[in-house]
Image: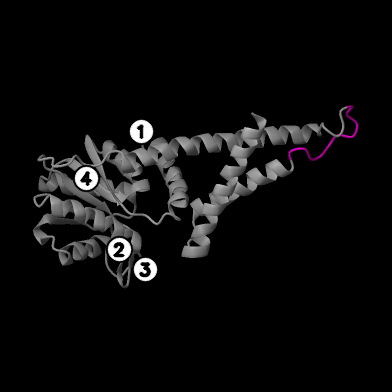
Amino acid sequence: MKRFIITLALLSALGALFFGFVPLAFYRIFHLGVLLLLLYGVAVILLLVFWNAFPDMMFPGYPKEQHLWWRVLRGVTTAGLCLVFLAGSFLSWRLFQAGHLDPPPEDDPQPATVVVPGCLVRETGPSLMLQYRLEAALDYLQKHPDAPVVVSGGQGPREPVSEAQAMADYLITNGISEDRIYKEDRSTDTQQNVALSAEVIRREGLPERLVVATDAYHQLRVRIYAETQGFQEVYAQSGKSPWGLVPSYGVREMLAIGEAVFLNGGTL
């Protein structure tokens, strides 16, 4: 059992270090999720390396017994890392479940509104991650020619146009009629994406059955905020995500989900 726990801890640490390193090395991306993965990996490895360090020479069982202060610190650190591992495992399952296991029903005649939360827009157009969201939306809209779409996102300080405008332009270029597209161009985060999109949906009398086109790891948070706005049916039309970025963005997403649940009244 002890060997199994050590092996599990080491594998989790190596996995965290690998997926913390990939965004830095291959995408030149650094954010809180990357930092936390690296810190977790380093902390677990240091704990394993120094587990039997700081022996108490005055103790009869020397060198197997350590100083009390180290045993206390070691125990508290172990408990904290175990809690992080268990919480991360649970939330990883919920992220996967929301992103991959609840797609819109096939050949369903009931009307639905597609909602596309915004992401970074560059001078050349939608960023890769935003393009993946739009491709997912486009796939649904082409199969359901009567479905309206709400594109949601304001204009950041380094963005040439609002995210909503960039998304609308992309969809129009790819054959979606302009009269199916509703723009919400004031929001600056996911909570506002959902809240202000809800205003548009209800003002325009659009179906309150939602199909959310976004990254798989982002679906759970959007769903939480959609439920706080009173939407009962929310389905996931998940776009592609670069595999090397999913764990770090997933970790960052877990922190945002904590905010959605504990500070903004959402439920898992």
Q: Residue at x 69, y 41 (%)?
A: 48
Instruction: Report whether 149 appears left or right of 220.
Output: left
Q: Residue at x 91, y 31 (%)?
A: 58
Q: Label 2 belongs to which residue?
A: 155
For disc 3, the neighbor class at 10 Å (few under 14, some 14 to 19, many from 20) is few
Tell me where residue 96 appears, x and y as whole percent.
37, 41
* Disc nearer the start of the sequence (1/4): 4
* Disc nearer the start of the sequence (4/3): 3
Q: CA distance from mark 2 to mark 3?
A: 8 Å
Mark 1 touches mark 2? (CB < 8 Å): no
Tag in front: 4 or 2: 4
Magenta residues span 51-60
Q: Nearer the viewer, residue 2 or 48?
A: 2
Q: Label 3 belongs to which residue?
A: 158
Tell me where residue 243 appears, x and y as whole percent.
42, 54
Mark 4 touches mark 3? (CB < 8 Å): no
Instruction: Report whether 49 appears left or right of 112.
Output: right
Q: Residue furthest bottom?
A: 124
Q: Label 4 belongs to which residue?
A: 211
* Residue 53 highlighted magenta (yes or no): yes
